[in-house]
Image (spheres, rainbow, N blue to C red):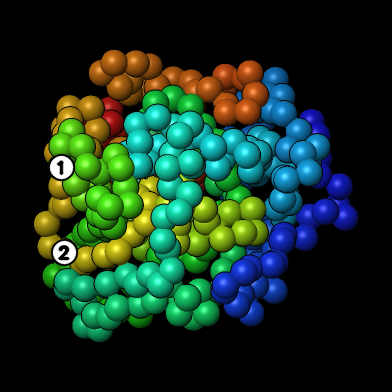
């Protein structure tokens, strides 16, 4: 296994536009998280030989070379050039080019609905207000491929605490920007835009759930959902909605874009579960992007210890 030399593990701190004064806490916070999170390690990692990210000069460093299971981080190049972002294109390898000039500054997010303190926040304001941490998470796409990504961000729970959901609020509904001038894929009538996702309030409040503004110590690029996206690592990737403009606290379960398009294939919960196949393919294993390895898919994507309690009364044989 290739490791980034310890001399290189200081995350890049150069931000062109934002002032990440609070980032000193980042490495410490990231390490604390890793120590607290050691599920199912040995069984799954045998035989993984991901390519060495450190050999590429354009490859930034993260605070560790692997996740807590020993899986190598996916390279910056792969994370930023193999993307699902249907508002730009259905072609994963052309999203980056089509999104290159996407305007992400200024950008504000409306937080509204069943809350005591609704507000509209500028993204720069959020970054100054909440300490950013690095979180190394596995990302498992429902299409049965996966990456390991060193995100920068802060727990969504911090923003929710600020707006104070009322006792009526049971779910959180997220909405992506819809701008057909800038998003060529969104000009197609194939999907009922805008992209919408939702979480139960307790899922949204779980410490793993992030609002992310960066990865590998740099600001997010448009193809990864700049300037602000959700990351929910125990759920299939489509739940991690990009470029959000609205966060709404609601009483009823939101209908996501994917539930709307194909309710039998993509449900509300979408928790990673190797025992429940997609109607058209197996979910038992996954292709590791950047290597020739296939690894077993883990229940809740390996975050069982942190999230299984959220579903203790639910039938997990229902993948949705
Ligand atoms: N708005 C929006 N968010 C989205 C998508 C999308 O098409 N539009 N694709 C989802 C899917 S299917 C995946 S796997 C992840 C991919 O994130 P990444 O490109 O940053 O790896 O984004 C999710 N968020
Ligand atoms: Mo996905």
State which quadrant residue 261 falls in: top left
Q: Is residue 11 above or below residue 120?
A: above
Task: State the residue in front, 232 or 10.
Answer: 10
Report the side of 242 relative to 287 (left or right): left
Residue 243 visible in the snapshot: yes
Q: How many marks?
A: 2
Residue 43 horizontal/vertical position (percent)? 62, 26
- Which mark is in front, 1 or 2? 1
Q: Is mark 1 within 8 Å of ligand 1?
A: no
Q: Residue at x 24, y 80 (%)?
A: 118
Q: Which mark is residue 278?
A: none
The residue indicated by pointer 2 is 250
Tag 2 secondary structure: strand
Task: State the residue in front, 280 or 186.
Answer: 186
The residue indicated by pointer 1 is 192
Dot 1 surroundings within 10 Å: few (below 14), some, or many (20 or more)? some
């Amino acid at each position: 296994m290739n490791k980034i030399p310890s001399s290189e593990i200081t995350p890049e701190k150069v931000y062109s536009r934002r002032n990440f004064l609070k980032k000193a806490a980042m490495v410490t916070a990231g390490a604390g998280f890793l120590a607290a999170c050691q599920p199912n390690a040995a069984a799954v990692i045998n035989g993984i030989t991901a390519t060495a990210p450190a050999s590429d000069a354009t490859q930034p460093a993260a605070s560790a070379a692997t996740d807590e299971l020993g899986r190598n981080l996916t390279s910056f190049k792969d994370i930023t050039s193999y993307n699902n972002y249907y508002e730009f294109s259905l072609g994963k390898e052309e999203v980056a080019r089509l999104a290159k000039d996407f305007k992400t500054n200024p950008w504000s997010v409306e937080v509204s609905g069943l809350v005591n303190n609704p507000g509209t926040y500028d993204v720069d304001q959020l970054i100054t207000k909440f300490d950013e941490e690095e979180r190394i998470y596995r990302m498992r796409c429902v299409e049965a491929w996966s990456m390991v990504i060193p995100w920068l961000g802060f727990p969504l729970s911090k923003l929710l605490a600020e707006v104070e959901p009322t006792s009526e609020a049971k779910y959180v509904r997220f909405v992506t920007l819809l701008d057909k001038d800038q998003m060529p894929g969104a000009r197609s009538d194939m999907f009922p835009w805008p992209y919408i996702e939702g979480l139960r309030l307790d899922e949204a409040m779980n410490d793993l759930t992030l609002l992310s503004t960066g990865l590998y110590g740099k600001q997010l690029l448009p193809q990864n959902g700049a300037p602000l996206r959700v990351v929910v690592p125990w759920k299939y990737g489509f739940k991690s909605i990009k470029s959000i403009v609205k966060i709404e606290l609601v009483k009823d379960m939101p209908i996501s874009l994917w539930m709307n398009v194909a309710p039998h294939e993509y449900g509300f919960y979408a928790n990673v579960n190797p025992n429940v196949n997609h109607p058209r393919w197996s979910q038992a294993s996954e292709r590791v992007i950047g290597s020739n390895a296939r690894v077993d898919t883990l229940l809740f994507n390996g975050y069982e210890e942190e999230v299984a309690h959220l579903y203790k009364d639910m039938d997990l044989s229902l993948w949705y």
